[in-house]
């Protein structure tokens, strides 16, 4: 199993100058003991090739792989053509950095917020992702949106872009449950999942169901915990990761087709449905 810790889990420590990308890599290797990094772009101070090469060398030294490069900042669609072009130029630099780091997947958001997606925006999203997929395919990397904010959370747009791009190098980063309509969009996200963000609420509620369904679909990406509270980040990320490991162990013990599907042990405890 590929386990990862999203570096955004430590965002407050990053903002306070207590953690950087190099300390993060050593933490996930020696403290969290996972095999894959999940680097949030807010942790990168530059896209300069020499700096990115230093990160790659540290990953190689620690025998770590990059499950995902999670890009905030540039997003695909912006109504202003100059802003749109600037976002694309910056994203191409992130893709170059992803290639240098050996990324298995790269996330960039669609854009959009409260407005409906226009035909122009849809056509641009499809054309741009086709271009990105062609580049990423050259180094065996998937690229796509996260069910994150704006249009990325809308099942109808997720499906339309996915169908329009129609590339094996296009994928979806499923931030569990974060859809405008989970029932309408979850199966699509799991079918095309390239990476996961498993947050604390899902650990307590439905992560076991998601893990089992992904395993049944032959998912080969990483199971990555992402913490959000900004408080006691190291301790709470440890709890989250340990709980995910326990959930995975339960699924493996019970099998993918159990006669009776049970809620995760921890979920039952938090719900008061059983005693420890």
Image (spheres, rainbow, N blue to C red):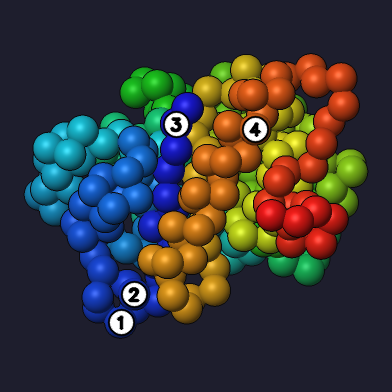
Reading the image, the residue beneath label 3 is 2
Q: Nearer the viewer, residue 274 or 181?
A: 274
Q: Nearer the viewer, residue 91 or 203?
A: 203
Q: Nearer the viewer, mark 4 or mark 2?
A: 4
- At horizontal 58% and vertical 66% (from top left) the residue drawn is 80
- Sequence-first tag of 1 and 4: 1
Reading the image, the residue beneath label 4 is 250
- Sequence-first tag of 4 and 2: 2
Q: In which image quadrant can residue 148 be found?
A: bottom right
Is the residue marked by circle 3 packed among few (<14), some (14-19), or many (20+) residues within 10 Å? Answer: few
Marks 4/2: CA–CA distance: 32 Å
- Picture coordinates of residue 108, whole percent (x, y): 52, 49
| Image disc number at residue 13 | 2
Kindly check if marks 4 and 3 are in contact, taking CB atoms under 8 A apart as contact.
no
Kindly check if marks 1 and 2 are in contact, taking CB atoms under 8 A apart as contact.
yes
Q: Nearer the viewer, mark 1 or mark 4?
A: 4
Is the residue marked by circle 4 packed among few (<14), some (14-19), or many (20+) residues within 10 Å? Answer: some
- At horizontal 47% and vertical 27% (from top left) the residue drawn is 1
């Amino acid at each position: 199993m590929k386990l990862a810790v999203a570096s955004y889990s430590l965002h407050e420590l990053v903002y306070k100058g207590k953690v950087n990308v190099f300390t993060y890599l050593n933490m996930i290797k020696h403290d969290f003991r996972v095999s894959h990094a999940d680097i949030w772009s807010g942790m990168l101070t530059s896209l300069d090739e020499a700096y990115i090469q230093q990160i790659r060398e540290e990953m190689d030294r620690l025998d770590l792989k990059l499950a995902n490069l999670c890009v905030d900042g540039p997003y695909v669609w912006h109504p202003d053509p100059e802003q749109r072009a600037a976002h694309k130029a910056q994203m191409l630099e992130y893709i170059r950095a992803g290639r240098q780091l050996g990324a298995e997947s790269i996330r960039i958001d669609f854009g959009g917020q409260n407005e409906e997606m226009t035909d122009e925006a849809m056509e641009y999203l499809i054309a741009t992702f086709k271009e990105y997929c062609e580049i990423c395919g050259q180094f065996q990397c998937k690229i796509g949106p996260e069910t994150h904010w704006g249009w990325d959370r809308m099942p109808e747009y997720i499906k339309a872009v996915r169908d329009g791009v129609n590339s094996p190098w296009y994928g979806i980063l499923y931030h569990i449950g974060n859809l405008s309509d989970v029932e309408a969009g979850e199966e699509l996200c799991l079918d095309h999942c390239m990476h996961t963000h498993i947050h604390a609420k899902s650990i307590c509620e439905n992560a076991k169901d998601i893990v089992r369904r992904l395993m049944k679909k032959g998912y080969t990406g990483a199971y990555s915990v992402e913490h959000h509270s900004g408080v006691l980040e190291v301790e709470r990320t440890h709890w989250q990761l340990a709980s995910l490991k326990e959930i995975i162990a339960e699924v493996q013990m019970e099998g993918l087709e159990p006669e009776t599907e049970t809620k995760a042990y921890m979920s039952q405890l938090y719900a008061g449905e059983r005693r420890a």
